[in-house]
């Protein structure tokens, strides 16, 4: 399909999405992280599935709690990678001042394989202090699961 004839849909909760070869691109607002962030939805031409829509709706409805739950886990990722700033202090919720969300990736139902149809959504961050460090919050079906390093 020509880049000039891309299929466009309006699909809540994702908003306006453009199709691009087995994925959809758009922007989503994450209230707890301030601003609009690029979203990639791994889906075929007919658009996001009901499971993807449900997982993203769940994540968006509870993103503040997810951020709170992820704070300690994200500090642990920084420590494991030996990147925690020396002046960090003891409040784990300050970790977010060292990160900016850069992308949200929504898997399809085949991500885990073996008939496991759960949806993996990762909120991927960039770190202005460490340009090759892209940690992520991992959610499963919109619920917090863990934080992982992206170095």
Image (cartoon, rainbow, N blue to C red):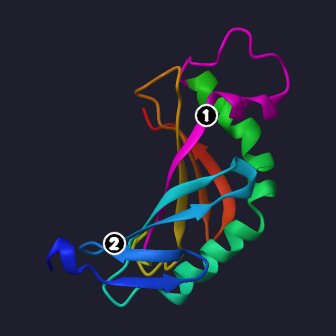
Give the x, y percent position of residue 65: 81, 56
Q: Look at 84% across and 20% down and name the residue there.
A: 90
Q: Look at 76% across and 70% down and name the residue there.
A: 61
- Looking at this rendering, what residue extends furthest in the left direction? 2
Location of residue 147 with respect to 127 vertically, above or below: below
Q: Let me know if residue 89 is in the magenta part.
A: yes
Quarter of image, res 63: bottom right
Label annotation for residue 26: none
Residue 117 lies left or right of residue 65; in this view the side is left
Residue 69 lies left or right of residue 55; in this view the side is right
Specify few, some or many for label 1: CA neighbours under 10 Å numbering under 14, 14-19, or 20 or more: some
Label annotation for residue 23: 2
Specify few, some or many for label 2: CA neighbours under 10 Å numbering under 14, 14-19, or 20 or more: many
- Looking at this rendering, what residue extends furthest in the right direction? 91
Instruction: Read off the magenta span.
Output: 81-108
- Looking at this rendering, what residue extends furthest in the top direction? 86
Label annotation for residue 99: 1
């Amino acid at each position: 399909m020509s880049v000039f004839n891309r299929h466009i849909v309006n699909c809540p909760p994702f908003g306006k999405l453009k199709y691009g070869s087995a994925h959809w691109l758009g922007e989503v607002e994450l209230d707890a992280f301030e601003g609009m962030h690029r979203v990639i939805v791994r889906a075929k031409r007919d658009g996001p599935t009901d499971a993807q829509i449900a997982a993203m709706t769940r994540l968006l409805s509870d993103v503040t709690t997810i951020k709170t739950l992820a704070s300690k886990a994200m500090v642990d990722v920084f420590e494991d990678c030996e990147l925690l700033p020396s002046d960090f202090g003891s409040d784990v919720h300050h970790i977010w001042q060292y990160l900016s969300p850069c992308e949200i990736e929504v898997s399809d139902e085949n991500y885990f394989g073996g008939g496991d149809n759960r949806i993996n959504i990762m909120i991927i961050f960039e770190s202005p202090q460490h340009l090759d460090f892209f940690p992520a919050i991992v959610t499963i079906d919109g619920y917090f699961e863990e934080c992982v390093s992206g170095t």
